[in-house]
Image: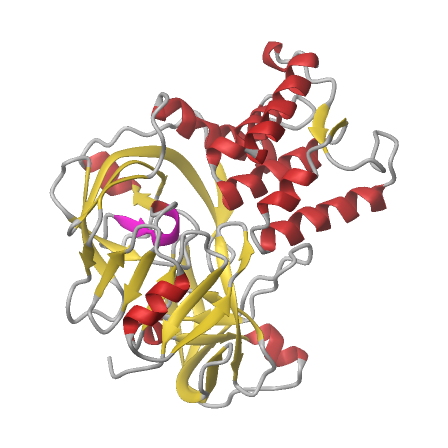
C-alpha cells in the first residue's frame, strides 16, 4: 500500500538521522522546492497545502508531501497530526515519533507534547489494533432528552450517561468518572486543545479496553481524560465518528439510536431508506467536520456538524462582517467542556444544509473563536434539532454524508 511505502521512507530517514538516540538532524517531509534554506513564505505555502489536503481527507495528497528529508520541525508536526486525523495512528506514527523526539521543539510545545500524547495510544495498545468493532447493531439514546444521551459501559463498569457529540473530535472521559471507577490513564503526557468558547483544556490519553453501548461493542478505543465542569453529570462525551473509525454508521434521530452499517456505502444506504436523500460534502479541520449551510440570510458557509449543540446556531462574526444582526431573543449562559459561553437564543431564521429544502428554524447566536491560520472559519452550528428530525449516514471514508428529508421528531 502507498501508506506503508511512505511510512517506510519516513522510518529510513529517521534512522539515518539517529532519531531513536534522541538526536534529530533532519526530519522527513515535503516537496522538491523546499530545503533548509527555504524562505518563510515557502513554509507557509506548504502548511497551506497540508491543511487543504487535510480539509478533504485527501490522504494521497498528504502522503505525496512525504518525499524527501527537510529540516523543518513544525511542518513535520503539521503533517503528522494531519495524517493522524485523516488516516489514523498507524499511518501517522512515524511522523509523530519524529516530532515527539525533536529537541528543536520545546517539550511543552503543542506540536511536541501532542505528538507524544498520540503515540501513548500505540504504547498502551501493545500491538493491538485500535477501534476494533467486536459487535455491531443498535446503540440507543435515552428518551425525553434535548441532547443525544447514551448509556455506555466502559471496561465492564456499570453504564454511565454519555453525551454523543459529533462536534467533539475525540471521545472524552470525565476525570471524576475515571478516578471513581479507577480507569487507568496517562498523566506523564498530555495534549492541549480548546472548547467551543475558546477555553484551554488539558487532555490525558486513556485507552478504553472495552466500550459497550446497546448492541455496539468496541475494544481498544482511544479517548482523553478531561476535567469537565461540575454541571456535566456524565461519564464523558462520545465522539461517534472517532470511536467508530473504519465503520459506517447511521445517526437515526426519529428512532433515537445510532446503527452501525459495517462498510456499506452511500448509494446502498440511500436506496435502502426508500425515501429521498441528500448529500453534503464534509470539510475537515483536524477532527472536526463542517458542512456548507445557509442560515439567517447569509451565503453558504461552513457550519460545524454538532449533535452536541442544543440548537442550530450562527456565529456572530460572519453576521457582523456582513453588517447583519438578529434582534430579539434571550441571552443565556451555555455550558462548554471547560466553562461557558454567552449565547442569544430564541431567534428565527432560514436554515438549509447544502441542497436540502430551506426551512425556518429557531437559531442561537454566539461568538466563535476564529483561527486566522485555519483553512476553515467556523460560521455556525448544525445542532441537535437538525439531527433529531432525520436519518444521517456516515460512510467509512467520511468525506460525505447522506441524509433524509426532515420528518417530525
Q: Is residue 270 or residue 105 the one in the foreground?
A: 270
Confirm whether the magenta stretch covers residue 125. Answer: no
Q: Which residues are magenta?
A: 236-242
Could one spot residue 69 in this view of the protein? yes
306 is higher (above) or lower (below) than 67: below
Q: Is residue 22 above or below residue 388?
A: above
Q: Residue at x 26, y 64 (%)?
A: 148
Q: Is residue 98 left or right of residue 237?
A: right
Q: Is the C terminus in the top left, top right, bottom left or bottom right quadrant?
A: bottom left
Q: Nearer the viewer, residue 40 or 122?
A: 122
Q: Is residue 322 above or below residue 168?
A: below
Give the quarter of the image for residue 113.
top right
Nearest to the observer: residue 179 or residue 68: 68
Q: Which residue is situated farthest in the left direction here? A: 158
User: Splitting the image into 4 quarters, where does residue 144 fall?
Assistant: bottom left
Residue 361's x, y, as percent? 40, 85
Quadrant showing the N terminus: top right
Which residue does the image show at 59% across and 36% down from the upper left? 80
Residue 406, x across and y down, in percent: 33, 82
Q: Does residue 239 belong to the magenta stretch?
A: yes
Observer-nearest of 359 and 276: 276
User: What residue do we see at 58% from left, 78% from top?
Assistant: 300
Residue 197 visible in the snapshot: no
Residue 334 drawn at (x, y percent) = 38, 67
Position in image of residue 228 (x %, y %): 33, 49
Amino acid at each position: 500500500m502507498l501508506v506503508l511505502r511512505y511510512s517506510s521512507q519516513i522510518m529510513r530517514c529517521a534512522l539515518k538521522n539517529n532519531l531513536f538516540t534522541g538526536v534529530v538532524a533532519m526530519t522527513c517531509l515535503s516537496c522538491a522546492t523546499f530545503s533548509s534554506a527555504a524562505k518563510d513564505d515557502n513554509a507557509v505555502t506548504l502548511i497551506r497545502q497540508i491543511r487543504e489536503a487535510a480539509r478533504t481527507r485527501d490522504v494521497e495528497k498528504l502522503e505525496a508531501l512525504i518525499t524527501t528529508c527537510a529540516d523543518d520541525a513544525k511542518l513535520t508536526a503539521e503533517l503528522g497530526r494531519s495524517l493522524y486525523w485523516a488516516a489514523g495512528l498507524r499511518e501517522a506514527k512515524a511522523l509523530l515519533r519524529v516530532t515527539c523526539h525533536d529537541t528543536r521543539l520545546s517539550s511543552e510545545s503543542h506540536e511536541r507534547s501532542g505528538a507524544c500524547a498520540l503515540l501513548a495510544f500505540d504504547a498502551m495498545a501493545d500491538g493491538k489494533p485500535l477501534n476494533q468493532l467486536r459487535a455491531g447493531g443498535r446503540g440507543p439514546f435515552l428518551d425525553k432528552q434535548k441532547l443525544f444521551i447514551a448509556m455506555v459501559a466502559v471496561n465492564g463498569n456499570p453504564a454511565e450517561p454519555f453525551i454523543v457529540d459529533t462536534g467533539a473530535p475525540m471521545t472524552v472521559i470525565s476525570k471524576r468518572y475515571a478516578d471513581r471507577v479507577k480507569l487507568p490513564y496517562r498523566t506523564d503526557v498530555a495534549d492541549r486543545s480548546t472548547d467551543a468558547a475558546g477555553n484551554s483544556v488539558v487532555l490525558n490519553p486513556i485507552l478504553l479496553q472495552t466500550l459497550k453501548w446497546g448492541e455496539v461493542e468496541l475494544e481498544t478505543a482511544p479517548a482523553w481524560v478531561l476535567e469537565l465542569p461540575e454541571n456535566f453529570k456524565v461519564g464523558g462525551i462520545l465522539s461517534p465518528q472517532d470511536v467508530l473509525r473504519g465503520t459506517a454508521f447511521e445517526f437515526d434521530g426519529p428512532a433515537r439510536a445510532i446503527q452501525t452499517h459495517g462498510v456499506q456505502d452511500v448509494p446502498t444506504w440511500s436506496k435502502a431508506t426508500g425515501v429521498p436523500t441528500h448529500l453534503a460534502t464534509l470539510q475537515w479541520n483536524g477532527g472536526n467536520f463542517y458542512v456548507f449551510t445557509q442560515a439567517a440570510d447569509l451565503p453558504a458557509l461552513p457550519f460545524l456538524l454538532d449533535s452536541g449543540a442544543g440548537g442550530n446556531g450562527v456565529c456572530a462574526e460572519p453576521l457582523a462582517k456582513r453588517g447583519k444582526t438578529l434582534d430579539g431573543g434571550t441571552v443565556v449562559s451555555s455550558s462548554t467542556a471547560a466553562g461557558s459561553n454567552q449565547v442569544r437564543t430564541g431567534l428565527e431564521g432560514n436554515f438549509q444544509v447544502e441542497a436540502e429544502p430551506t426551512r425556518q428554524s429557531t437559531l442561537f447566536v454566539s461568538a466563535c473563536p476564529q483561527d486566522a491560520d485555519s483553512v476553515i472559519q467556523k460560521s455556525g452550528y448544525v445542532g441537535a434539532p437538525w439531527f433529531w428530525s432525520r436519518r444521517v449516514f456516515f460512510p467509512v471514508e467520511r468525506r460525505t454524508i447522506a441524509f433524509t428529508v426532515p420528518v417530525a421528531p
